[in-house]
Amino acid sequence: MQSDPKRPKVTRSRTGPFLVYILLLLSALPASTPYAGPTTPAEPGEVSYVKKPPEAVFKDKGREQSYFIADADTPLRFEVTGPAVLNIGVRGIVDADAKGKAAFAVTITRDSAFVSANKAEMIPEPNKKGVAVEVPGRAGAWVTQERTFQIAVPEGEHEYTVAPPDGKAPGVLARVTKATAKDPVLAAAPEVAIVPPLLPLTPKAGTADRVITARREGGDAAAVEKAAPAPAEKKRAQKYFSSALKIDTLFPTNRVSSTVAVTVDLRYILPVHENRISLGVETGWYSMYGSGKGIDPGIGVYDYTYYMNNIPIFIGPAYELPIPGLDKTPFNVFVSGGFAMVVSRASGFMFGGNTYTSGTALGWYGGAGAEFDIWIGRILCEVRYQSVRTDYGLPQNMDAGDLGGTHLYAGYRFVL
């Protein structure tokens, strides 16, 4: 069959249904939004304030510190992303003429669950030229020195509240900063340590130190309380010898003047009982001087004087006491005792002439003292009593024969 040349030729398109399908798909998609660039999550330790309370400014010779006034009506609330360690600096608000220490308290709450209650006593800032405090609405107010509490923020986003513990407690000035390794601060009580702290934290003195850790149960983080590890005891490395140079003030038992002596102490440290026991010998030199009046049947009353040069020798043990808690400090407390001997030479003047004699005094000694570790040894102080007597064969021997007395030592011990 031939086509009619007068009718236009109709061509059927095969792409029509496909275009309809594409249009239907596009109409089903949600409306797009303009591209705003990549989002930046909050840095750990970055603080954003939920609602800023009134601010106060502390000025010290051109240096300014800004604080928030945190009280029961306007607590300080902020959000932070962990893990991080934060310092919360707090100043108590006092009267301008306040004297002595001022007590204040602050409660740190995390996510309306964990509560850290902290108390402090701080002295007021010196009220001097160049120091000023501007506390809005509190004319004549002054502040204490700052006490900084440190908290370890767990991983994730958290909200903290800083405020006095109750509505009756006075408000405080508070500021929040990210901690650095140079901050000498005090850990909050108890410390919020669900993650390992980023900085070494000093435990709060005088309280039962506690640490809050966490475990996962059914997807929720539950706080579990356990005792904090005890501070490491001072390591007692094995030492074998010690030598000490001492300055000694002797208060004699007899009626002679007090005197100053110089002694040297050499000791061997026994490798037993944590190196607490040592055996030693000590020697030195000291002099004595005395005078008085005597009565002779033929002469009557006469004057006499005498001088004594003495070399003491002490031989005996010493023991460092294992006092609980003292091994965590640089202090040592010891007791000592043993055999005492004094080699003495005396010269006397009476009846217009001089007499000379010598003798050896035997006896005992006992004492106690304390030492402080510093440098390569220890600074020491000691109180010791010695009881030694000899017979010079002189008329004034009732005084001169007793070479004992109370010693006060101060010196330095080298430990090798």
Image (spheres, rainbow, N blue to C red):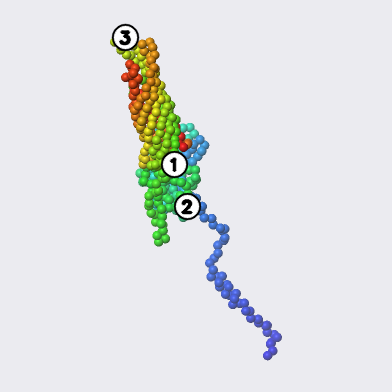
Which residue is painted at 57% across and 75% down in the image?
21
Q: Residue 274 or 20: which is nearer the viewer?
A: 274
Which quadrant is home to the N terminus? bottom right
Which residue is painted at 38% across and 54% down in the image?
224
The amino acid sitting under disc 2 is: Pro
- The residue that mark 2 highlights is 83
Which residue is painted at 33% across and 11% down in the image?
302
What kind of element bears circle 3?
loop
Task: Tell whether label 1 touches label 3 (CB within 8 Å).
Answer: no
- The residue that mark 3 highlights is 299
> How far, Cα to Cα, is label 3 from label 1?
66 Å
Q: Is residue 144 above or below residue 74?
A: above
- The residue that mark 1 highlights is 238
Of labels 3 and 2, earlier in sequence is 2
Observer-side mark, 1 or 2, equals 1
Q: Residue 258 or 192: which is nearer the viewer?
A: 258
Of labels 3 and 1, earlier in sequence is 1
> How far, Cα to Cα, is label 1 from label 2?
42 Å
Q: Residue furthest bottom?
A: 1
Q: How crowded is mark 3: few (under 14 residues within 10 Å), some or many (20 or more)?
A: few
The amino acid sitting under disc 1 is: Gln
> How far, Cα to Cα, is label 3 from label 2?
97 Å
What kind of element bears circle 2?
strand
Of labels 1 and 2, earlier in sequence is 2
The amino acid sitting under disc 3 is: Ile
What kind of element bears circle 1?
loop
Q: Is residue 394 above or below residue 227?
A: above
Observer-side mark, 3 or 1, equals 3
Which residue is painted at 51% across and 38% down in the image?
63
Q: In this view, does 131 lie to the left or right of 338?
A: right
Residue 316: x, y in percent? 37, 33
